[in-house]
Amino acid sequence: MPKNVGRRPESESEREDADTCKRVKLDPDVSGPVFDFKSPATLFESLISPIGSKEFFGEYWEQKPLLVQKNNPSVATYYQSLFKFDDLKEICRNDVFYGRDVNFCRCISGKKKVLNKDGKVNYMQLKKDFEQKKATIQFHQPQRFKDELWKIQEKLECFFGSLVGSNVYITPEGSQGLPPHYDDVEVFILQLEGEKHWRLYKPTKPLAREYSTEPEDRIGSPTHEFTLKPGDLLYFPRGTIHQADTPTGGSHSTHITISTYQNNTWGDYLLDVIPWLVYDTMKEDIELSRGLPRQYLMQMSSSADSARKLSGFLRGLADQLENGKETRSSEMRKDFILNRLPPYMGNTSDCLTQAGKLPKLSDQIKLRFKDHTMILVELDQERTDESRDMMVYVYHSLKNSRENHMMGAEDNEEEESFRAHGLRFSWSHLEALKQLWTVHLFLATNFGAHGFCKRLRMGEGGRMQALRSSDFFQLWPGKEKVRTADAGDQS
């Protein structure tokens, strides 16, 4: 892996060019709901407002920072409700542990010093240490405890199609928790309490794939420097070097970092789809089934002939893609659907409590939780022999655990949980399933949907059958004309 290299001092002109972080200030009389939860798209629009999504993804996403200073008391009040220091008193009544749930740390002489105790967190002791040791409280994945954050992050996962995590940072006045570093995620920072002084630096590894600290003497002068106040929003791309401290003479600072797009790149996608593409092609192209040259694996480097051979195989795969060959991403999709948040249902504890009825031929039917379901074509998981057929699996996140979101799990726990969350169909159902996913409303008589729903109710699929038909379908009253959904339709 290439090493980071030192950077020469920047000239004034270079710094002016780099200082392209747009500062947007809103008038204080802006009123109305802070976030619009009508759909994932409207939520994101309200999060970055007044910048629109088109401008954001065209000019800022993966490119440069954006600072939105909303200057609105109602926004500041709402942001504070998301998480405040006093919330820890109630949260610590649960099984909250150092290391897993809370890190207690401080930046001393440019290095991170972890001051965690052992075992369960005691709120009064944590508060005492916070005041005396001037260290930062880093609380992991607060959406597990705060409903409004669950609501926000679940919608953002639907919007991005990628996992969305969060951490809360509470720092005493006159202190800094972390040294200069960069992250492997796209970052949205919401200032909740107090003020935080930020310095951003030009990336040494643009769009970094891993977290790393950087010493002060290698990062040069800040390209951006500002202080966040309650209600402010800051975005910056992965790889952006940053550090932040709480100014002296004021109160503590609380901010939440909402992050996404970890390992969600074209490179990761290729690592996922290429094995399937090669597997399928080997069935049709005998050249891929021919043996390697003798002692090929014992050689230190490849010969020119071998390189040409590999290049030819890769060009053949590329030609197949350009000619319409379907790609099958399996592991990335599974990871997302398995580990994402379940739908936010407000005061309803279970989104699958509706018993439902088998649709009549005259009924109109609407697909439920479309954003939380996924169709994959895979080898039959119920068999282990080489003659396994391809099967269609409808996976869902309706029964995912909010309490374990982004916290990791043992491999055997993940496998068992994953197998229980979906439906299994024979290959012959693929086209019918695709049609269900592309139609907003449909009649029960369309493409044999009535019989299809019967098969769902009867539980075709053995161990994968974990839902009733009513969990995926609901009767839709009225006589609205059946239409094909636009690409941007949200459920």
Image (cartoon, rainbow, N blue to C red):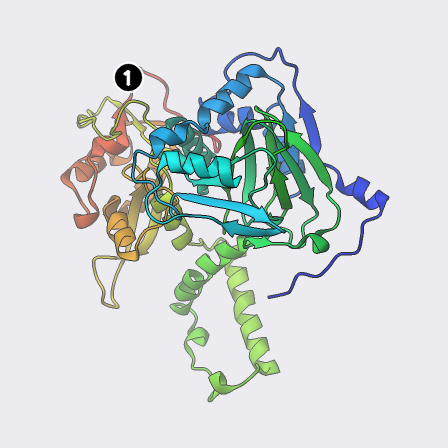
What SS does tag 1 mark? Answer: loop
Q: Position of residue 382 (x, y in %)?
A: 21, 57
In the image, is residue 32 above or below residue 408?
above
Q: Position of residue 388 (x, y in %)?
A: 25, 62
The quadrant in which the C terminus is found is top left
Q: How many labels does the image show?
A: 1
Q: In which quarter of the image is residue 374?
A: top left
Q: In which quarter of the image is residue 406?
A: top left
* Residue at the extreme front of the image, as rendered: 132
Q: Nearer the viewer, residue 65 or 90?
A: 90
Instruction: Write down the residue under mark 1.
Output: 477
Q: Residue at x 19, y 35 (%)?
A: 468
Q: Residues within 10 Å of mark 1 (few under 14, many from 20)?
A: few
Horizontal side, residue 9 vs residue 191: left or right: right
Q: Can residue 251 be seen in this view?
A: yes
Question: Which three-letter amino acid code belongs to the residue tagged 1?
Answer: Pro
Q: As drawn, is 153 to the left or to the right of 305?
A: left
Residue at 81% from the left image edge and 49% from the top image edge: 10
| Image x and y of residue 151, in percent | 40, 28
Q: Is residue 234 above or below residue 390?
A: above
Q: Which residue is drawn at 59% across and 39% down?
A: 175
Q: Which residue is drawn at 55% across and 43% down?
A: 177
Does 233 appear above or below 265?
Answer: above
Which of the pair 315/159 is nearer the observer? Answer: 159
In front of the other: 455 or 13? 13
